[in-house]
Image (tube, grey):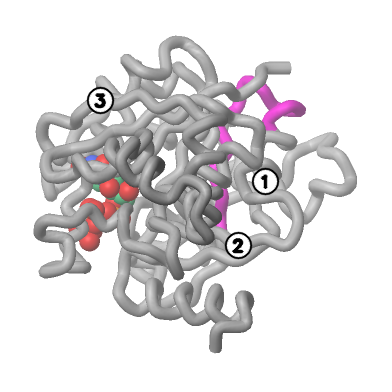
């Protein structure tokens, strides 16, 4: 059994779909209610038993490092006042988690961002959370569900997938799957072997409507493959292309997670998520 000790957060992207708001503020710091997207992601990793957060940042993202650091003046100001409880969640995160950072030099895509994280990860299997995909669960978090599955398949990568409408396939990496032989009964309808995957296919070439979302467990051999992966037509290195090499060897599993996912990288998804969480908290 290989434990997963580190979670990588690639957060160097430009957040173009959210301009002009993302010009000086990282989209990962946008709050759903009062909590930044990245903090939701870090809390998900903690809930899955991971304490080491490896963050791939870029220019203009300094607010992220400040957020996960002590703020002595604020702490002193609020100590023993009725407002001190507002600091409870972030204090808990700072106490339990350690944060390390590396900067992506050029925004050459998610694959390149993950490659940049190698120096923080080393030679072990690791989790990846894209914080703009916000997940909500009543039971175990999506990452916790995936780590449970990884215990049975320590040599495989696992990607979280979700059914999307055929109009939407062109926005995602889409997978083709087949059943895994001898899989545990409780996983039969949830975990599948990936036989092919295409990044942003046309409706016609799409092998299914199962889209990869922002949760991965990756084995360290992905780093060597990423180094050899050519950029796509937009000059970006796609993690899907690198994973395809491992899928061809039967080493990538698609996991249909339990729970809800919100695409908070788009304005519409962000609004839907905000409404969902506001309703859940009885605010609207
Ligand atoms: P997205 O495409 O969703 O994010 O990338 P983006 O590039 O910030 O947003 P748009 O498309 O311009 O609106 C998925 C994840 O990969 C990270 C992003 O920060 C996001 O978490 N990423 C993307 C990087 O870290 N580096 C990159 O070069 C590209």
Up-down relation of residue 217 to residue 258 (above or below): above
Q: Quadrant of the C terminus?
A: bottom right
Horizontal side of residue 248 vs 203, given as left or right: right
Q: Which mark is residue 136?
A: 2
Visible in this render: residue 248?
A: no
- Location of residue 132 in the rendering, given as x and y in whole percent from the top left corner: 38, 57
The 10 Å Cα crowd at callout 2, few under 14, some 14 to 19, many 20 or more, is some
Judging by the rendered image, the residue that carries numbered circle 3 is 102
Q: Which residue is the extreme one toward the bottom?
A: 284
Question: In this view, which residue lies farthest toward the front?
Answer: 80
Q: Residue at x 53, y 60 (%)?
A: 82
Looking at the rendered image, the disc whose residue lies closer to the viewer, 1 or 3, is: 3
Q: Residue at x 13, y 48 (%)?
A: 233
Numbered circle sitting on residue 181: none
- The span from disc 1 to disc 3 (Cα, nearest Å) is 33 Å
Residue 158 within the segment the image draws in magenta: yes
Q: Contact, CB < 8 Å: mark 3 with mark 2?
A: no
Q: Residue at x 31, y 55 (%)?
A: 29
Q: Are marks 2 and 1 in contact (CB under 8 Å)?
A: no
Nearest the eye: 255 or 64? 64
Which of the two residues, 70 or 142, is positioned nearer the viewer here?
70
Tell me the SS state at disc 2: strand
Helix, strand or loop at label 3? It is strand
* Front: mark 2 or 1: 2
Q: Which residues are magenta?
A: 150-161
Label 2 residue near ligand 1, CB within 8 Å? no
Q: Which mark is residue 192?
A: 1
Q: CA distance from mark 3 to mark 2?
A: 28 Å
Give the residue furthest to the right. Answer: 185
| Residue under the point 49% across and 76% down | 165
- Mark 3 or mark 2: which comes first in sequence? 3
């Amino acid at each position: 059994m290989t434990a997963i000790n580190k979670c990588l957060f690639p957060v160097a992207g430009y957040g173009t779909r959210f301009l002009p708001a993302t010009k000086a503020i990282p989209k990962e710091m946008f709050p759903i209610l009062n909590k930044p997207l990245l903090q939701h992601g870090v809390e998900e990793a903690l809930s899955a038993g991971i304490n080491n957060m490896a963050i791939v940042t870029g220019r203009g993202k300094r607010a992220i490092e400040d957020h996960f650091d002590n703020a002595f003046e604020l702490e002193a100001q609020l100590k023993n006042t009725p407002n001190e409880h507002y600091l409870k969640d972030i204090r808990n995160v700072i106490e339990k988690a350690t944060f390390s950072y590396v900067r992506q030099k050029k925004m050459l895509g998610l694959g390149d961002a993950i490659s940049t994280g190698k120096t923080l990860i080393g030679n072990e299997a690791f989790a990846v959370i894209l914080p703009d995909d916000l997940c909500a669960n009543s039971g175990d978090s999506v990452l916790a569900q995936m780590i449970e599955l990884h215990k049975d398949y320590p040599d495989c990568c696992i990607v979280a997938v979700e059914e999307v409408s055929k109009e939407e396939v062109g926005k995602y990496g889409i997978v083709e799957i087949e059943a895994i032989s001898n899989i545990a009964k409780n996983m039969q309808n949830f975990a599948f072997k990936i036989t092919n995957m295409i990044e942003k296919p046309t409706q016609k070439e799409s092998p299914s409507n199962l889209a990869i979302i922002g949760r991965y467990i990756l084995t360290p051999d992905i780093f060597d493959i990423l180094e050899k992966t050519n950029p796509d037509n937009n000059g970006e290195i796609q993690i899907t292309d690198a994973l395809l090499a491992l899928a061809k060897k039967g080493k990538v599993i698609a996991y249909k997670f339990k729970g809800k996912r919100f695409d908070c990288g788009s304005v519409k998804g962000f609004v839907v998520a905000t409404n969902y969480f506001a309703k859940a908290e009885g605010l609207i």
